[in-house]
Image: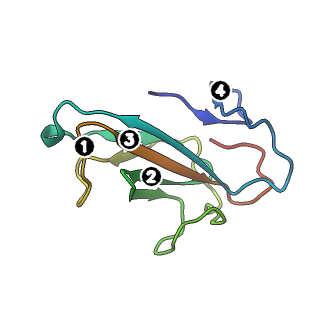
């Protein structure tokens, strides 16, 4: 569904119940959801997201997009987002047109890792 997810913001953010962790805070946070499709052959949809500071999107275990993250680098828990994330802008990612992406009738997993640019950030979204 649609909902901002994170902490430290007052504009309708769905609280992750992590509170305000003490510094140093984690660089990466992980979110995922599952969904089913009626017809996997006619699928095509856009994912709209806002992020602060960077994000990596995975569909069924395969990376499908990066936003404000280092290119050509393996992404892990300790990979910071690049400074200057566009938390006020929407980024559109077309998930139905990606080469090699395979949708399933049931049990598709959409996952996002959100990366801060440093361990003192007071919010995540």
Secondary structure beneath label 1: loop
Q: Nearer the viewer, mark 4 or mark 1?
A: 1
Q: Nearer the viewer, mark 1 or mark 2?
A: 1
User: Mark 1 or mark 3, which is nearer the start of the sequence?
Assistant: 3
Q: Quadrant of the C terminus?
A: top right
The residue beneath circle 3 is: 47
Q: Are marks 1 and 2 in contact (CB under 8 Å)?
A: no
The dot on residue 57 is: 2
Secondary structure beneath label 4: loop
Residue at image coords 63%, 57%: 84
User: Residue 53 placed where, x, y %?
Assistant: 62, 53
Q: Is residue 58 left or right of residue 46?
A: right
Quarter of the rendering containing residue 76: bottom right
User: Mark 4 or mark 2, which is nearer the start of the sequence?
Assistant: 4
The residue beneath circle 1 is: 104
Q: Residues within 10 Å of mark 2 (few under 14, many from 20)?
A: many
The residue beneath circle 4 is: 11
Q: Residues within 10 Å of mark 3 (few under 14, many from 20)?
A: few
Q: Nearer the viewer, mark 3 or mark 1?
A: 1
> Rounded to the nearest whole Å, what is the CA distance between mark 3 and mark 4?
20 Å
- For the residue pair 98 and 101, the one nearer the viewer reads as 101
User: Mark 4 or mark 3, which is nearer the start of the sequence?
Assistant: 4
The answer to whether residue 76 is above or below residue 6 is below
User: Mark 1 or mark 4, which is nearer the start of the sequence?
Assistant: 4
> Rounded to the nearest whole Å, what is the CA distance between mark 1 and mark 2?
17 Å
Secondary structure beneath label 3: strand
Quarter of the rendering containing residue 54: bottom right
Q: Residues within 10 Å of mark 4 (few under 14, many from 20)?
A: few
């Amino acid at each position: 569904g649609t909902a901002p997810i994170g902490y430290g913001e007052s504009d309708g953010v769905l609280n992750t119940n992590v509170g305000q962790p003490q510094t140093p805070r984690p660089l990466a946070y992980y979110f995922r959801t599952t969904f089913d499709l009626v017809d996997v052959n006619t699928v095509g949809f856009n994912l709209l997201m806002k992020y602060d500071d960077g994000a990596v999107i995975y569909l069924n275990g395969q990376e499908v997009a990066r936003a404000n993250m280092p290119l050509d680098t393996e992404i892990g828990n300790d990979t910071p987002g690049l400074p200057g994330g566009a938390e006020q802008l929407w980024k559109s990612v077309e998930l139905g047109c990606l080469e090699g992406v395979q949708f399933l009738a049931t049990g598709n997993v959409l996952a996002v890792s959100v990366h801060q640019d440093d361990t003192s950030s007071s919010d995540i979204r």
